[in-house]
Amino acid sequence: MRRITAGLAATTAAVALLIGVKANSAGGAPRSALAGLGSSRSAGSTPTGAAPSPGRTAAAAAAAAAAAAAAANGSFDGSVVRTQYGPVQVQAVLKEGRLSSVVVLQQTDGGRSSQIDSYALPVLTAEALKAQNADIDVVSGATFTSEGYAQSLQAALDAAGR
């Protein structure tokens, strides 16, 4: 009887340990489907292997990022991204360091692509304005347009120094 009790206790402890390790390695919040594209990286993240500066709080880092972003004002053209269905290019408009609008300069053209863009581009723009960066989700049924949009927007934000 003691062996069974000891075995159950050891098994329970091992399962709890494994669950704890798995939960810590999950990486926190879910990532965007476009997170790995180009040089886009969510604000506040550190490069792989880099540790945050000692003595620097998250609030101080956010304030420094906001101050750097506040310097950017104006319109910044993103790169032309060639997709399977044609080029995609956007322009980021920043006011007081915030993304105030995204203008589509080029979009895929012809037949079904025009239909897809007519519903996907407004959704992508709304998501970008909400996120204030290019780390946005792919619109279902418009994968190529979504990827091109995000890459071009990231290039525009890079040109703005964001």
Image: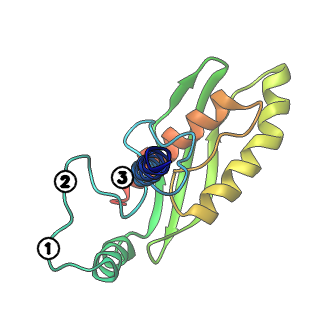
Q: Please tell me in which quadrant of the rendered image residue 147 appears.
A: top right
- Give the Cα separation between the discs numbered 2 and 1: 12 Å
Q: Is residue 45 left or right of residue 101?
A: left
Q: Can you identify the residue that label 2 sits on? A: 50
x 45%, y 36%: residue: 37
Q: How is the image coloured?
A: rainbow
Pointer 2 with pointer 1, Cβ within 8 A: no
Looking at the rendered structure, the kind of residue marked 3 is: Ala
- Mark 1 vs mark 3: in front: 1
Q: Can you identify the residue that label 1 sits on? A: 54
x 40%, y 62%: residue: 43
x 28%, y 82%: residue: 60
Looking at the rendered structure, the kind of residue marked 1 is: Pro
- Mark 3 vs mark 2: in front: 2
x 48%, y 43%: residue: 35
Residue 115 % position (x, y):
85, 31
Pointer 3 with pointer 2, Cβ within 8 A: no
Note whether 73 is above or below 162 in the view shown. Answer: below
Residue 21 % position (x, y):
39, 50
Q: Can you identify the residue that label 3 sits on? A: 159
Q: Is residue 152 left or right of residue 87?
A: left
Neighbor class of circle 2 (other Cα within 10 Å; few <14, some 14-19, many 20+) is few
In front here: 114 or 139? 139
In front here: 5 or 153? 5
Q: Earlier in the sequence, mark 3 or mark 2?
A: 2
The kind of secondary structure element at disc 3 is helix
Q: Note whether residue 147 is visible.
A: yes
- Please give the label number shown on residue 152: none
